[in-house]
Image: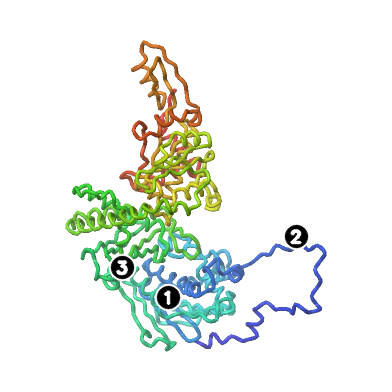
């Protein structure tokens, strides 16, 4: 096999661009039009040239992690054959010279001529063309890890040498490549008495990768071990011929019960909160998705939920992991309320996640990842599938294991109380810490040192902000004026969001971070109150703010921190009596009840900025006389609210129009 990689030096030199001596007299002097920019400056990269030119775009860099990503791309294709039901065994062999071979007993890559390019085989198209492969055809692969059609072609492009061997219908076919280009034709090497399959042998190109890095046996073993337990019944044989690690020279990885075997074998059981684990595997009703899980609860400090999609490790989590955690939290709170456990409302996601130890694995059609390296899942369907399956199964688990369930809940309450105590200690130093913070210039902060009992009013415009600052209780109430309508994050790019100063000011004032960096402990106020004018524009601004909080800080809503102020729209006065009405219906009710036989005057507030500070205080900001509406996520699944937000605030106008047609009340 090693003879395959004895590359002639001349060939290698010819494949590299020539380098000229910068002092050579043959170099032409630059043209006077140094800054000219014409069609001649436009370079077209063909075939796999973009991969070799910018490898970091496809594998995340040229370091050790990127090198092992090449192996991942190849073995994922073999695992996809297993998941599809066409293979059950994969062989991985590491040889001297940093050469690695991955073989499977699947169907074998098609070798017949491609219909659109009859002069080339389907195999050559797959190996040399970006975005070409069987993963775009749902009939070939229902669920797979490789959906971009770039994996194996990228490996080929970044390999000094690559050999493909395919067995189909008892015949052996072979083709070889160098730097992504075929150096032999597809050859038929006679008959062979063996089942179908594919074998890929490649050596990375060290003109691209650092020559000091190599395939690490321990890292390869960790990858194949993970693949084996994620696909129950898959057998992966490992062979190391380098003699560098004789203790792990040959191994077979096989987990007939999948991830539950791995969890029971690998995780630390010494600090378990309860002996019972939460295991399961379930398909969707339409059979287009599957969720598998095995979960333990431990008091250890190295707990981590490992998540995967179509056997791809999602090390940065994503929609499936978030749905899993929220489903667990929701079930725990519902069960606590059902059996009458007090104080369970203080349990947050952080309290239960810190105790989780296990594996979540889902299989779905056409998953969407963030980037080619697929470290975070962004598919919305993963939320729906995971949430519904886990909610149903964990509800049953809690009921069937009532004793263990109560132990868990009491532990979570204890964890929550400890968290709140630490937060209280931090609040004691809040005043001195605030002196060091650079808070937004327009923020009128409160004087209270602790966050308990404090409120932040988010108001529209400097005029309303001025009235609110005069009307507030300075000890507990802070005011942050915003300029007009904020960015709609539901249909804006992350670049626009990151450049939006108003949202930056808001995030800075809250102090709790966003998205995965959100921390409820760092939230600087107990209540966040949106206070906008009582008109259509005010309602729109409130909707934009709610959308922002739901998209970027959903836990702020889940943990009951977000509210809407209810300012009056009308002032009704007669004699010595003054009443305030929040809308037309309220106005008519007050008139009928208070001014049936007396004269009265009605004035309409054009905005909060036109209200006198004492009027704003009495009607909207005073804790004893005001009315607040809490923004909450009830018992409906989180994906229900995601759908509503997308319909109303997303970029699809037809979805918004349809929602209005179906839900609006129209009056003649």
* Marker disc for residue 197: 1
Residue 520 % position (x, y): 37, 52
Asked whether 216 or 162 is in front, the reply is 216
Q: CA distance from mark 3 to mark 2?
A: 58 Å
Q: Which residue is the site of mark 3?
A: 259
Q: Secondary structure at mark 2?
A: loop
Disc 2 residue crowd, few under 14, some 14–19, many 20+, Cα 10 Å:
few
Sequence-earlier tag: 1 or 3: 1
Q: What residue is drawn where x is 38% and y is 43%?
A: 454
Left or right? Give the position of 354 relative to 138. Answer: left
Give the label, 1 or 3, closer to the camera.
Answer: 3
Q: What residue is drawn where x is 50% and y is 35%?
A: 466
Quadrant housing residue 633:
top left
Sequence-earlier tag: 3 or 2: 2
The correct choice, above or below, for 271 with respect to 473 in the image is below
Disc 3 residue crowd, few under 14, some 14–19, many 20+, Cα 10 Å:
many
Residue 506 at least partly seen: yes
């Amino acid at each position: 096999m090693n003879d395959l990689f004895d590359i002639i030096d001349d060939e290698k030199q010819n494949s590299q661009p020539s380098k000229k001596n910068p002092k050579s007299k043959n170099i032409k002097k630059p043209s006077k039009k140094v800054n000219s920019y014409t069609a001649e400056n436009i370079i077209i990269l063909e075939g796999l040239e973009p991969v070799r030119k910018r490898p970091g775009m496809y594998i995340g860099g040229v370091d050790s992690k990127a090198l092992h990503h090449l192996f991942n791309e190849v073995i994922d294709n073999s695992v996809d054959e297993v998941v599809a039901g066409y293979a059950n065994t994969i062989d991985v062999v590491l040889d001297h010279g940093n050469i690695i071979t991955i073989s499977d007993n699947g169907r074998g890559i098609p070798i017949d001529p491609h219909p659109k390019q009859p002069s080339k085989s389907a195999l050559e198209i797959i190996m040399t063309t970006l975005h070409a492969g069987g993963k775009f055809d749902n009939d070939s692969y229902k669920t797979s890890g490789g959906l971009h059609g770039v994996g194996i072609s990228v490996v080929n492009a970044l390999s000094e040498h690559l050999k493909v061997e395919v067995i189909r219908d008892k015949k052996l076919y072979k083709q070889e490549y160098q730097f992504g280009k075929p150096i032999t034709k597809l050859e038929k090497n006679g008959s062979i008495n063996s089942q179908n399959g594919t074998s890929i042998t490649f050596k990375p190109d060290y003109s691209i990768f650092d020559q000091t890095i190599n395939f690490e046996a321990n890292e390869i073993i960790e990858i194949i071990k993970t693949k084996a337990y994620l696909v129950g019944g898959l057998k992966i044989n490992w062979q190391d011929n380098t003699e560098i690690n004789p203790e792990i020279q040959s191994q077979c990885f096989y987990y007939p019960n999948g991830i539950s075997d791995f969890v029971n074998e690998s995780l630390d059981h010494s600090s378990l909160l309860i002996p019972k684990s939460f295991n399961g595997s379930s398909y969707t009703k339409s059979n287009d998705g599957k969720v598998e899980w095995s979960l333990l609860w431990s008091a250890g400090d190295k707990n981590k939920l490992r998540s995967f999609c179509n056997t791809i490790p999602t090390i940065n989590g994503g929609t499936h992991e978030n749905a899993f955690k929220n489903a667990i939290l929701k079930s725990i709170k519902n069960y606590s309320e059902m059996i009458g456990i007090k104080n369970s409302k203080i349990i947050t996601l952080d309290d239960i996640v810190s105790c989780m130890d296990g594996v979540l694995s889902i299989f779905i059609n056409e998953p969407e990842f963030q980037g080619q390296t697929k470290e975070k899942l962004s598919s919305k369907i993963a939320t729906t599938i995971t949430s519904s399956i886990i909610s149903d199964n964990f509800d049953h688990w809690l009921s069937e294991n009532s004793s263990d369930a109560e132990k868990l809940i009491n532990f979570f309450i204890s964890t929550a109380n400890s968290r709140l105590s630490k937060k209280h200690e931090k609040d004691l130093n809040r005043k001195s810490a605030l002196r060091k913070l650079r808070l937004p210039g327009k923020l009128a902060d409160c004087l209270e040192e602790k966050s308990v009992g404090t409120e932040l009013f988010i108001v529209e415009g400097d005029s309303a902000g001025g009235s609110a600052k005069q009307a507030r209780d300075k000890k507990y109430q802070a005011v942050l004026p915003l300029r007009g309508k904020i960015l709609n994050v539901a249909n804006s790019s992350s670049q626009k969001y990151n450049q939006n100063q108003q949202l930056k000011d808001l995030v800075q004032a809250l102090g709790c971070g966003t998205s995965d960096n959100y921390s409820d402990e760092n939230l600087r106020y107990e209540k966040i109150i949106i206070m906008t004018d009582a008109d259509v524009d005010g309602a729109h601004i409130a909707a934009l703010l709610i959308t922002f909080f739901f998209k970027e800080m959903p836990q702020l809503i889940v943990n009951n921190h977000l509210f809407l102020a209810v300012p009056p729209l009308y002032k009704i006065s007669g004699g010595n009596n003054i009443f305030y009405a929040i809308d037309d219906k309220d106005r008519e009710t007050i008139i009928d009840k208070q001014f049936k036989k007396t004269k009265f005057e009605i004035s309409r507030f054009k905005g909060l900025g036109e209200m006198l500070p004492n009027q704003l205080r009495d009607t909207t900001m005073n804790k004893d006389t005001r009315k607040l509406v809490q923004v909450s996520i009830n018992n409906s699944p989180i994906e229900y609210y995601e759908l509503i937000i997308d319909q109303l605030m997303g970029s699809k106008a037809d979805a918004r129009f349809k929602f209005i047609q179906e839900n609006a009340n129209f009056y003649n």
